[in-house]
Image (spheres, rainbow, N blue to C red):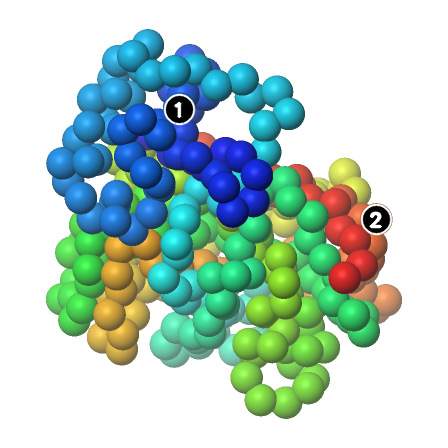
Amino acid sequence: MKLLRVGTAGAERPALLDRDGTLRDLSGLVPDIDGDLLADESALARVRAAAAAPDGLPALDAEGLRVGPPLGRIGKIVCIGLNYHDHATETGAAIPAEPILFFKAPDTVVGPEDTVLVPRGSRKTDWEVELAVVIGRTARYLDSAEEALGHVAGYATAHDVSEREFQIERGGTWDKGKNCETFNPLGPWLVTADEVPDPQALLLRLWVNGELKQNGTTADQIFPVGEVVRYLSQFMTLYPGDVINTGTPAGVALGQPDPKPYLRAGDVVELEIEGLGRQRQELKDA
């Protein structure tokens, strides 16, 4: 299923994109697309039944309708740094022996076509297309990558916007370069795991002002999705509605020759992951 949330920010309603590409209203079946839904097998069964016979769901006019983040009430966003071989190479970083972790606050999440704000004082705002993993079952101390994949509800396209000066040159952890407002566009869809048989076989692309910058595949991940979920479960409990951003392939501004083409107000970033939908953001000054 392709689940999404539409409407004005803070007042989104749950929806479904049916097999014919028609947007269908789910608000008569479930209150939201969130961790409570993903953990409720009976509610998910109702949604699956409706998806199989979508004519019973009201159609929504998509014209001019904002698409919000496909997941509401996100618990936590755990991010994996330097998780692609080619990205580690382009930045001159050593291949990590264990996953590098940092966090993004849920309030960084915006819709896939919402404005991204360049922070005040920023000189090095960068782009990163990423596969987002959405947790559907509580995960703690998992024994294997195969078991871990059974705790995944679905996948989405994420844009891990980053301010490299704040992240790398200002001391401390990476988090202050990752948590500026609007720095995690998510969506358009939450695609359920049954429609993504192999999360290590997805193409990722990103364009800046129409120029292709990133063109990678999740097959290049150093730590595959199942291993990432298993590993995280040894250090923290993952709950339904938690999100994991799994890293970015080569092609970011940080890895390019000087002068590096960091983002500025007026730039347009477009990104997509095979089968998971496309985003478009115009940048403005905060």
User: In terms of image quadrants, where is residue 48?
Assistant: top left
Please identify, in this view, whether the residue under mark 2 or under mark 1 is nearer the observer.
1
Q: Is residue 222 above or below residue 31?
A: below
Query: Left or right: 216 with respect to 167?
Result: left
Residue for point 18% across, 68% down: 140
Residue for point 33% across, 16% down: 57
Front residue of 240 and 36 = 36
Can see residue 265? yes
- Element carrying mark 2: loop
Query: Left or right: 48 with respect to 250?
Result: left
Amino acid beneath label 1: Asp
Q: Quarter of the image containing the N terminus?
A: top left
Front residue of 38 and 158 = 38
- Could you tell me how far apart the alpha carbons at marks 2 and 1 are, in whole angstroms? 34 Å
Q: Residue 25 bears which disc, if any? A: 1
Q: Residue 271 bears which disc, if any? A: none
Q: Quarter of the image containing the C terminus?
A: bottom right
Sort mark 2 into few (<14), some (14-19) or many (20+) by Cα contacts within 10 Å: few
Residue for point 50% across, 34% down: 6
